[in-house]
Amino acid sequence: MKFEALDKKMRVFETAHDYCVLPEVYIVVRLDGRNFTRQTKELWDLEVPFDIRFRDAMINTTHHLMNCGFHVVYGYTQSDEISLLLAPDEATFGRKTRKLISILAGEASAAFTLQMQQIACFDARICELPSIDIVEDYFAWRQEDAHRNSLNAHSYWLLRKQGQSVQAATNYLVGRTVSEKNELLFQNGINFNDLPAWQKRGTGLYWQAYEKQAVNPLTQQAVTTTRRKIQADLELPLGLPYKQFIHQLL
């Protein structure tokens, strides 16, 4: 069989189940670290409950993903996860889900591995969101998850540092309300409201325009040009202001 005929025959098995995100549907790709709970304990020797080196590695990985060939308008990271909001008109690879998932997971894994100098792996999934309102709700949801994770982590590691076992600390927190966990921290000298915002709200990355002085190569005259750079925001707003911020990006 000639190669052209064989290629046409076999391509069917590779592409028969290709799925593409429909036009005008918003795309968010969420990436999660694989087995990061074990690696944070056994390989990376991180500070608990939050580690600056790990935070910066996640921020730098998000920065890389926003520069690796896709039109990403917003990147959000908290804990070991990253959410990427693609531009509404993003059409790279025909919006094929397998391409988006495989490339972004691979890029994230490679970038984070270089940051931490230990092999790391991310998985990826696609959220297809039908409206701007749902996009706003998505990021509000992830930020609320960050807040809950932060409160639980500070409470858990407070108990562990006081000498409680893994099981005892875990059991103590089961069924505790948000106010009870806040009170636990407060009674031990930690005001949760005063902790760094990035620990409670995550970090957002977005494109920001700035002016740069340059020289016109033809006329040799000084000119002002507009460039873009990625801004990492460790002081994200909460609630409605955060939703309005997401809305403005689109």
Image (cartoon, grey):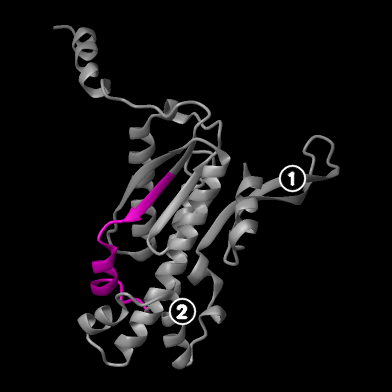
The residue shown at (60%, 52%) is 243
Image check: 168 left or right of 23? Answer: left
- Circle 1: residue type: Thr
The residue shown at (20%, 20%) is 13
Relative to 170, say whether 76 is above or below.
above
Identify the mark at residue 226; answer none if there is no mark: 1
Question: Which image quadrant for residue 58?
Answer: bottom left
Pinpoint residue 234: horizontal percent, then vertical percent.
Answer: 57, 66
Mark 2, other Cα within 10 Å: few <14 / some 14–19 / many ≥20: few
Relative to 203, say whether 160 is above or below.
below
Question: Which image quadrant for residue 88?
Answer: top right
Mark 1, other Cα within 10 Å: few <14 / some 14–19 / many ≥20: few
Element at label 1: strand
Relative to 242, say whether 90 is above or below.
above
Query: Is 12 or 8 nearer to us in this picture?
Result: 12
Name the quadrant of the C terminus: top right
Which segment is the magenta one?
29-47
The residue shown at (76%, 50%) is 211
Magenta segment includes 250: no
Image check: 9 left or right of 92? Answer: left
- Circle 2: residue type: Ser
Pinpoint residue 101: horizontal percent, then vertical percent.
Answer: 35, 40
Name the quadrant of the N terminus: top left
Element at label 2: helix
Residue topped by disc 2: 179
Asked if residue 50 can be seen in this view, the reply is no
Alpha carbon of mark 2 to alpha carbon of mark 1: how far?
48 Å
Pinpoint residue 244: horizontal percent, then vertical percent.
Answer: 65, 51
The residue shown at (20%, 80%) is 167
